[in-house]
Image: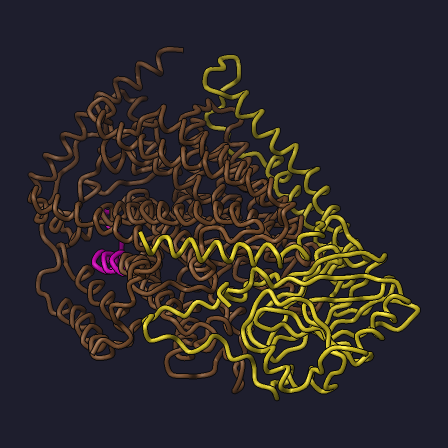
Chain colours: A brown, B yellow
């Protein structure tokens, strides 16, 4: 009846997961009861859960991402403390638990932390920056988000019920085959990643279509903000690479479930094929994350320097160059498999060539500041921290792309330090810079400056104190994923790294405090103008938060930096553009289909993991029925009356009048 | 509370076991930048050269970034403001050529280095290389000396100054054969044979490890490496041949079972076809963990640290 599932799946004998599960369950029950008591369900259902508004979905993606970053960070704390305590000692985490933790850390940080945040930014920003009212497929978008959330749910469920994979975040066979890992851990991994992978692919398709087909009038390709270019490049990579992941994991699933032999040791299977295939996805995945991050930095450098981005066309070329070349470098993850000198040479050179693209970008950001008036507000601090951190991460990355150097550092702590250097320094810093920068746009008030700056300094210093020792340890010969350490000489470095984690904890606390303080002081921090940073692209033309239809009248773009042009014209002519003729707007109706499908997808994944075949069949049919039912709906859109549009837009214009007055006074000052 | 106590008691027991067995590995450590042989020295030279070349570029770049950011800070009223300056052909030419030239140089380094230090390439030497066949097992290393007809577990003895040619395979999951101070690591893969040539210049104690996670017992997948003089090596071979068990089918079947922290030992005789039989999987790969215990639904029986 319940497959492999029984009460013994709950880890009663393991205090750490048990207590954690208890606390998490209490928090979830607490939140749910609060929502019920306060009667917020109808609001949540109507405005968020069933919403197809790209801004709401973007915000939900970011919320999911931030929660998962915290979960992944908790894993990181355990890993660093375990290694520091387990020097010639067993530490407090036995291998069967420790191995789950580093696997969960990698999986969660990349696929359920960084990915949702990056997708959230793309969802929120691309339509606003392109001057359109929604993404190409709004309901599909909601399905994508909820499927990602479903994957995250399954990963976290493995903490309470059963176990998570003990194979590392990319489950290399033969270790991940049923012979060597018979538990449900790898199955949790497979189904969670498969379900969320579908969600990611949906967002990829959506953003590509939106950028290619839905720009507002005058928004030619070479007038798009660089963030839109990077989002396009990133989503092209999603569309190209995620099907590879889906197919690879499907083959591993068939191996595990029905005893096929794609990657097994015997019967003609070849585990090396998995390694090739998974990195054919895995390396583009890195650029899927970091390209939008580059887009975020581009917007911030330009805005806070009060100048257009230097070398816009170079930037576009470099972005698309990275997009293409990133599909041709995957083998650098396993130079040490003995592919031969010629193959290693090809992939070594193609990998380091990517550094040309990133190098050009770095110089362009530096020259964006040249001749500017650089304001060191929090987003700019993160960006400067990024320049420093990422250049050094780039150096160690090129080192790892040199095969003989990689023969010494492959799979070492040096590698661990390198990819944290580029992913934290590149992607996570961008995420915090971006959250700081666009928070007022999403919620209508700024985040507290002081707490934000404190959070940056803790994160920046904490990062270097944590990861510099790991570089050293790698050069001392320490490999990754050690549950205990047999070389006492490594002790001092492991201790310093724990101190770094302590500083990072302060960073997380200040970041949370910043949010709490800002919500408390929201009236004082309110952004009435809709343009709190003196922005340059179209999202700043809308009020904060933007109305659900984004633009009362579709903008007409007449050059690069669309909103900057509008602002200049207004200041020069000392008046806003004349009030347009307001017309009714058609907007897509809310739909529960995303939530419904994801609910049954979760049930399906869970029952596949536990071999509850009948429930899996029921859930699959139910999830599919949701789509079919949705296809039969009659009403797709509703009409926003012209009076409503006019009311919202007149309020915006009033705020803009005030802004114009202020800007004109500033202009007059020097 | 009782659960907690028993858990801690269990850890304390393991603590004692661990400290005894780890002493061997712990007594010798050294990094990849302290090479003990020509391959390690070659790898390390390339690592350092590439770092220096890139530092020449990136240190000025970082300085430039912070200098420009500081000079054009908003509060600095005497810095010029160029609100429309966003293109300069000359600057563009420079910012493209700096990374391109650097990468061309690094590309040359990659090209030459990849061929010169290809792990499969044999080392030039006056005397013929010593052959060692390496089989990674869950979770120990088996070293077979076909020319001498002996084998060792978790201990590699090699004559100093003589190249050693390793043929490497795995009897279960992926591992990476790595002796940090000797240089180049390479994967041990089931059904495949990797090759690697290494040499230790002087007698001494080194250590080796697996550099690819291979399951719960991975943390102890380390082995001692003793580089000894040629005469000591012959003496050691003679001694190994005189005592110890024979590595036959039954003994190998025992080795295939999952175990960890296996103390070093030698076999006085071997089946000469053993390595071929493992690499071609005539002997099927290791069986993995014991069948799951029904009392732990979905959770594997612990295979790590409790044997």
Quarter of the C terminus of chain A within the rendering: top left
Quarter of the N terminus of chain A within the rendering: bottom left
Q: Is residue A73 magenta?
A: no
Q: In the image, is B72 to the left or to the right of A63?
A: right
Q: Nearer the viewer, residue A522 or A642?
A: A522
On screen, residue B92 above or below A483: above
Q: Residue furthest top?
A: A669
Residue at x 52% of width, y 61% of height: A327
Q: Nearer the viewer, residue A579 or A314?
A: A314
On screen, residue B223 above or below A224: below
- Place residue A668 in its image quadrant: top left
The rendered magenta stretch, by its main secondary structure, is classed as: helix
The magenta stretch spans which residues? A133-147
| Residue B104 percent across, percent down from the top left | 70, 51
Q: Nearer the viewer, residue A344 or A255?
A: A255
- Picture mark count: 0
| Residue A165 percent across, percent down from the top left | 41, 64
Q: In the image, is A335 to the left or to the right of B111?
A: left
Q: In the image, is A4 to the left or to the right of A169?
A: left
- Place residue B170 in its image quadrant: bottom right
Can residue A596 be spotted in the picture? yes
Can residue A345 be spotted in the picture? no
Residue at x 14% of width, y 29% of height: A651
| Residue A379 percent across, percent down from the top left | 40, 32
| Residue A164 percent across, percent down from the top left | 38, 63
On screen, residue A542 above or below A76: above
On screen, residue A486 above or below A655: below
Residue at x 73% of width, y 73% of height: B266
């Amino acid at each position: 009846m319940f497959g492999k599932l029984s009460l013994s799946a709950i880890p009663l004998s393991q205090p750490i997961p048990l207590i954690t599960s208890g606390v998490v369950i209490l928090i979830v029950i607490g939140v749910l009861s609060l929502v019920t008591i306060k009667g917020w369900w109808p609001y949540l259902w109507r405005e968020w859960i069933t919403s197809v508004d790209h801004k709401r979905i973007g915000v939900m993606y970011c919320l999911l991402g931030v929660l998962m970053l915290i979960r992944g960070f908790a894993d990181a704390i355990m890993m660093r403390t375990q290694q520091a305590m387990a020097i010639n000692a067993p530490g407090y985490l036995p291998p069967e638990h420790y191995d789950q933790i580093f696997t969960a850390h990698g999986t969660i940080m990349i696929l359920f932390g960084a990915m949702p945040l990056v997708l959230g930014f793309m969802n929120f920003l691309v339509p606003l920056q392109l001057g359109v009212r929604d993404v190409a497929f709004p309901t599909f978008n909601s399905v994508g988000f909820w499927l990602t959330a479903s994957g995250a749910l399954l990963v976290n469920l493995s903490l309470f019920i059963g176990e998570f994979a003990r194979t590392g975040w990319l489950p290399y066979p033969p270790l991940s085959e049923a012979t060597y890992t018979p538990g449900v851990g790898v199955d949790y991994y497979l189904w969670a990643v498969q379900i969320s992978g579908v969600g990611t692919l949906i967002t990829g398709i959506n953003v590509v279509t939106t950028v290619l087909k839905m720009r507002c009038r005058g928004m030619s390709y070479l007038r798009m903000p660089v963030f839109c270019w990077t989002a396009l490049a990133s989503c092209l990579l999603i569309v190209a690479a995620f099907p590879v992941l889906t197919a690879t994991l499907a083959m591993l699933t068939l191996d595990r479930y029905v005893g096929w032999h794609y990657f097994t040791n015997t019967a003609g299977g070849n585990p090396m094929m998995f390694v090739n295939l998974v990195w054919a996805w895995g390396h583009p995945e890195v650029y899927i994350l970091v390209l939008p991050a580059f887009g975020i930095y581009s917007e911030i450098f330009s805005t806070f320097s009060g100048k257009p981005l230097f070398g816009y066309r170079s930037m576009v070329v470099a972005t698309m160059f990275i997009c293409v070349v990133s599909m041709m470098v995957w083998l650098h993850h396993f130079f040490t498999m003995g592919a031969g000198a010629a193959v290693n040479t090809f992939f070594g050179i193609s990998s380091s060539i990517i550094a040309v693209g990133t190098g050009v970008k770095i110089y362009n950001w530096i020259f964006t500041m040249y001749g500017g008036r650089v304001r060191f507000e929090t987003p700019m601090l993160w960006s400067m921290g990024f320049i420093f951190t990422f250049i050094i991460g780039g150096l160690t990355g090129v080192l790892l792309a040199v095969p003989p150097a990689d023969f010494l550092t492959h799979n070492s702590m040096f590698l661990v330090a390198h990819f944290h250097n580029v992913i934290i320094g590149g992607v996570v810093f961008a995420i915090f810079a971006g959250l700081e920068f666009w928070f007022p746009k999403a919620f209508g008030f700024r985040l507290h400056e002081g707490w934000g700056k404190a959070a940056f300094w803790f994160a920046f210093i904490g990062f270097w104190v944590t990861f510099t020792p790991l570089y050293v340890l790698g050069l001392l010969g320490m490999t990754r994923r050690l549950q205990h350490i047999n070389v006492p000489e490594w002790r001092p470095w492991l201790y310093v790294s724990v101190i770094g984690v302590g500083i990072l904890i302060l960073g997380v606390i200040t970041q949370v405090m910043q949010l709490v303080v800002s919500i408390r002081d929201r009236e004082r921090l309110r952004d009435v103008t809709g343009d709190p940073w003196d922005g340059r692209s179209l999202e700043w033309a809308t009020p904060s938060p933007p109305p659900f239809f984004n633009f009362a009248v579709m903008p007409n773009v007449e050059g690069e930096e669309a909103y900057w042009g509008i602002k200049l014209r207004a200041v020069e002519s000392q008046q806003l553009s004349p009030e347009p003729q307001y017309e009714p707007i058609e907007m897509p109706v809310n739909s529960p289909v995303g939530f419904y499908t994801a609910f049954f997808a979760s049930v399906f994944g869970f029952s596949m993991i536990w071999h509850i075949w009948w429930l899996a069949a029921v859930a699959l049919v139910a999830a599919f029925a949701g789509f079919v039912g949705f296809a039969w709906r009659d009403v797709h859109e509703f009409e926003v009356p012209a009076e409503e549009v006019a009311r919202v837009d007149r309020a915006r214009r009033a705020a803009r009048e005030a802004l114009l007055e202020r800007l004109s006074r500033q202009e007059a000052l020097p | 509370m009782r659960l907690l106590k028993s858990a801690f008691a269990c850890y304390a027991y393991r603590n004692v076991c661990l400290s005894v067995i780890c002493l061997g590995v712990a007594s010798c450590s050294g990094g990849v930048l302290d090479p003990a042989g020509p391959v390690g020295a070659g790898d390390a030279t390339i690592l350092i050269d590439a770092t220096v070349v890139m530092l020449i570029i990136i240190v000025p770049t970082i300085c430039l970034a912070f200098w420009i950011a500081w000079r054009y800070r908003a509060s600095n009223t005497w810095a010029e403001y160029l609100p429309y300056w966003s293109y300069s052909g000359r600057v563009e030419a420079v910012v493209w050529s700096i990374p391109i030239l650097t990468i061309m140089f690094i590309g040359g380094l990659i090209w030459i280095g990849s061929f010169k230090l290809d792990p499969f390439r044999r080392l030039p030497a006056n005397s013929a290389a010593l052959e060692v066949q390496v089989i990674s097992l869950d979770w120990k290393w088996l070293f077979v000396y076909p020319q001498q007809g002996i084998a060792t577990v978790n201990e590699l003895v090699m004559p100093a100054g003589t190249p050693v040619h390793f043929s490497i395979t795995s009897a279960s999951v992926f591992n990476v054969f790595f002796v940090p101070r000797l240089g180049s690591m390479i994967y041990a893969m089931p059904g495949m044979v990797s090759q690697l040539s290494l040499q230790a210049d002087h007698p001494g104690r080194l250590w080796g490890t697996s550099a690819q996670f291979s399951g719960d017992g991975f943390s102890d997948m380390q082995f001692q490496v003793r580089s000894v003089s040629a005469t000591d090596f012959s003496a050691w071979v003679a001694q190994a041949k005189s005592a110890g068990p024979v590595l036959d089918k039954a003994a190998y079947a025992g080795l295939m079972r999952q175990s960890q922290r296996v103390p070093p030992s030698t076999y006085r005789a071997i089946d000469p076809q053993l390595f071929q039989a493992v690499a071609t999987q005539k002997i099927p790969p290791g069986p993995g963990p014991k069948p799951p215990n029904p009392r732990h639904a979905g959770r594997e029986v612990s295979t790590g640290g409790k044997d």
